[in-house]
Image (cartoon, grey):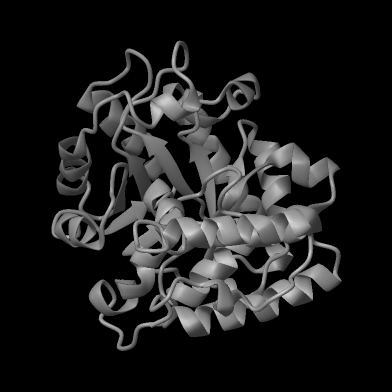
Amino acid sequence: MKPDHTLSIAPMMERTDRHFRFLMRLITRHTLLYSEMVVDRTLIHGKPARHLDYHPSEHPLSLQIGSAVPELAARAVGIALPWGYDEINLNVGCPSERVKRGGFGVSLMKEPRRVARIVEAVRQATGVTMTIKHRVGVDDHDSYEFLARFVEVVAAAGARVFIVHARKAWTEGLSPKANREVPPLEYEKVYRLKRDFPELTIVINGGVTSLEQARGMLEKVDGVMVGRAAWDRPWLFARADEEVFGRAGRPSRDKVLAAYEEYLRGQMEEGVPLRALLRPLFNLFKGEAGGRLWRRRLDSLARAGKLVSKLRSLAPEGGLE
């Protein structure tokens, strides 16, 4: 069964690790989750379990791969297959220096035929049709015609899902953070892609900060991917199952924290540091009364290195409904 791309949380380095994904799955059952990007050679030459293990509750779940070499991409996806991810995604959007040195990420937008060969090699070797996450342009290649040609070539290789960050990226002169903020959002280019390629699944990404905004976008595209807003304000997604997917029921923070604490204690028994486990919780009450106090209390726990009280007892007054 193919995952539903109606609403998803973007792959974010040093953000969407397995602990954050576990928390988000407690908050929303139906939003598609993405892993951090994993480089092909890391899976081939490293310890795959370190990067691929996840909690069974995280489904639906996508694995994002970074690769520029068809043969290596196919090997990496083959290694990942036994883990049973619902989707394998190719990163064609990251502009970081490390990614640029590896020849993959957004630089690949200039080589659509190479991306097509990666899609073909992976499908032939594993039976998996990768999805593609990319930008609306790169450097001076920022016309709609350039974007449409990229999608056309890669779609001809079999790709059916294109997740489009509605900002172009500069490979020189801007940091990854600046590349998420400085280039202007060009939503209309993504909407036009859907009109021009109605047979493809087009998902829009970039600058989405609310479910209301996402619902408006869903009138023009097939899906919406939320990035930093999910990390900054994870409780926004407490209404997602009801308001986006039409499924009844909202979680309470009381039950979410109780379940996460059980998970946390189990992970600590396996040697996972408390700070890594508490980190996804820091923004759970962001923007609400008591949110700063909550973060200070969590920080004190992290410094102590042990869980000395129940997480629910640290929550702001009236914040557990």
Nearer-the-camera pick, 294 or 277: 294
Q: Nearer the viewer, residue 76 or 49?
A: 49
Identity of the residue drawn at 61% across and 31% down: 68
Kindly identify the residue that appears in the image at 52 percent across and 40 percent down: 91
Q: Residue at x 76, y 41 (%)?
A: 42
- Horizontal side, residue 99 vs residue 288: left or right: right
Q: Quadrant of residue 308?
A: bottom right
Q: Position of residue 75 (x, y in %)?
A: 73, 46
Residue 176 position within the rendered picture, expressed as x and y whole percent measured from the top left = 48, 27
How many discs appear?
0
Nearest to the observer: residue 233 or residue 304: 304
Q: Which residue: 30% across, 88% down?
A: 248
Q: Is residue 64 visible?
A: no
Quadrant containing the C terminus in the rendered view: bottom left
- Give left or right: position of 217 versus 131: left
Left or right placement of residue 315 versus residue 56 in this view = left
Q: Relative to residue 277, is residue 75 depicted above or below?
A: above
In this view, the residue in front, 264 or 76, is 264
Say above or below: 213 vs 3.
Answer: above
- Does residue 216 sit above or below 255 in this rendering? above
- Look at the image and tell me whether residue 26 can be seen: yes
Q: Position of residue 302 (x, y in %)?
A: 70, 57
